[in-house]
Image (tube, coloured by chain):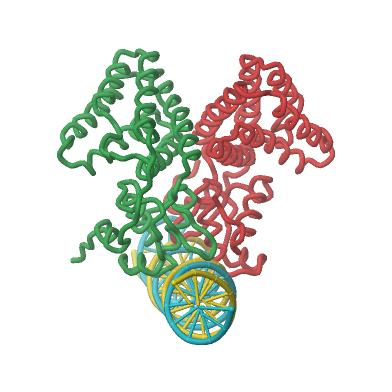
Chain colours: A green, B red, C cyan, D yellow
DNA sequence: TTGCTTTGTGTTGGATACAATAATTGAATA
DNA sequence: TATTCAATTATTGTATCCAACACAAAGCAA
């Protein structure tokens, strides 16, 4: 949907990643000037990226007031989690109608990655945990479903950034393993239950005792996300 | 999500409406120049609108080749309809857990509108039929769910524009009435069945003989495949 | 013809420039 | 000291401009 050959794509992608990984926390202002500077592009280009992120709900773009990382309210948070339950239920139901063997194989490979970085690289762990869910959705073969899941998982990261105390506890690897086991056996009932309680657990950890977050230096954070220029 | 106080909003909104109402058919080029002229704005402003529409899947924005109304493939069409079933199933399930009285009241008012223009103003009929589904989603109180339904209903319009022969047959008003009746009685089972068969009917009318509709566009499609293609 | 290069025209990608709006500062007054 | 309001500054909204690219037609070779 978004063609990466444009100049605004790296900006979009980096911002997105930074928001998901919570380097850019909810409420942080995203001035076009400074972002353009760190990426070496003009405001026009940055603006394009911001418009897209606004459409995805990761950024809040207010007229004459510029962009900032979205700050989902507690109500929106519940709304998003409920929607996520719906989408991921659909994912499970579709996967259960398919041949489990190649699915399980792919998932196990991913799980191995997750285990590899568990407790070592927390940022990577978090990303991998999110990608597990996206991978599940992709395995259904439905582009749209995968898109929606991708979007909603991102927004859940935002919610965690806003309300949860400990981000690393987002996804339990064992729970992923359990889900894979259920899928391997073709046990739809159990797979569904697994996913449901898994997501419910994430939600609880996020929304049980909500507390606020604060901001940081945008340019400094983004410079870490800027793609390294490899020029011959 | 999209603040209407910008200058690009009317452009976005008009284009969206035109696409949904099939005045702009799939594949039609959307040059920034001419659009900007008709709206009295610059290309920059138009571009903003196009980026948003691209993000929503209504417009296809290709680098250096500009924008055109999206042309969903038959595979994407099935994918989208399947997703729509999932989303609207969720809508029904949520509505069935709520107090039916105010819901039914609102829906009946809408239905009356639909009946009023049935057979008279086809464009308006089509729009109202689509809005019925969006209204259902809004009544759940979930912003996200309503957004998704809105988006997917729009994309279904696009599919109909591409593949169906008769657009006016999109939604049966009686079927809407039946659904309302089921909701009024709190009969979740029946409401679900209603919605399912209703959507299935729409899908069938759209995708049953897609070859005819596609052959209309063969010339246009082939003209884009310029180089070294063997003739039939 | 057929295939390949070239040139020309139109359109887009992106940077810059200027206008409009919001945020901030600071001085004057109570 | 607190408050108001005007002036300044910062940031965004939008238009315009130039370079880059795509597509089409014309020329050229075989």
Looking at the picture, tell me which residue is in the foreground, A71 or B46. Answer: A71
Residue A222 occupies quadrant: bottom left
Residue found at x 54% / y 51%: B53
Q: Residue B194 location, x and y as percent?
A: 66, 20
Residue found at x 47% / y 34%: A78
Residue B152 occupies quadrant: top right
Residue A35 occupies quadrant: bottom left
Q: Quadrant of the C terminus of chain A?
A: bottom left
Q: Residue B207 location, x and y as percent?
A: 60, 30
Q: How many marks?
A: 0
Tell me if I can see residue A119 in this picture.
yes
> Is A59 placed left or right of B111 in the picture?
left
Looking at the picture, tell me which residue is in the foreground, B227 or A16. Answer: A16
Residue found at x 58% / y 56%: B3
Looking at the picture, tell me which residue is in the foreground, B103 or A147. Answer: B103
Q: Residue B175 location, x and y as percent?
A: 72, 24
Above-or-below relation of A98 to A40: above
Looking at the picture, tell me which residue is in the foreground, B186 or A9. Answer: B186
Above-or-below relation of B187 to B44: above
Above-or-below relation of D12 to C7: above
């Amino acid at each position: 949907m978004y063609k990466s050959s444009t100049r605004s794509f790296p900006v979009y992608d980096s911002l997105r990643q930074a928001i998901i990984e919570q380097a850019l926390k909810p409420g942080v202002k995203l001035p076009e000037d400074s972002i353009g500077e760190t990426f070496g592009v003009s405001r026009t280009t940055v603006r394009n990226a911001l418009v897209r992120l606004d459409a995805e709900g990761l950024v809040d773009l207010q007229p004459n007031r510029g962009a900032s990382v979205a700050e989902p309210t507690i109500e929106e948070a519940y709304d998003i989690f409920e929607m996520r339950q719906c989408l991921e239920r659909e994912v499970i139901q579709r996967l259960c109608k398919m041949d489990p063997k190649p699915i399980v194989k792919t998932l196990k490979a991913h799980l191995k990655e997750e285990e590899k970085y568990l407790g070592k690289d927390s940022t990577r762990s978090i990303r991998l945990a999110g990608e597990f869910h996206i991978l599940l959705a992709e395995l259904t073969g439905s582009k749209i479903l995968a898109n929606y899941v991708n979007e909603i998982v991102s927004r859940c990261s935002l919610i965690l950034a806003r309300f949860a105390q400990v981000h690393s506890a987002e996804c339990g690897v064992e729970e992923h393993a359990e889900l894979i086991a259920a899928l391997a056996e073709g046990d739809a009932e159990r797979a569904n239950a697994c996913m449901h309680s898994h997501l419910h657990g994430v939600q609880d950890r996020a929304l049980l005792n909500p507390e606020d977050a604060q901001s940081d230096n945008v340019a400094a954070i983004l410079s870490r996300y800027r793609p390294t220029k490899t020029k011959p």
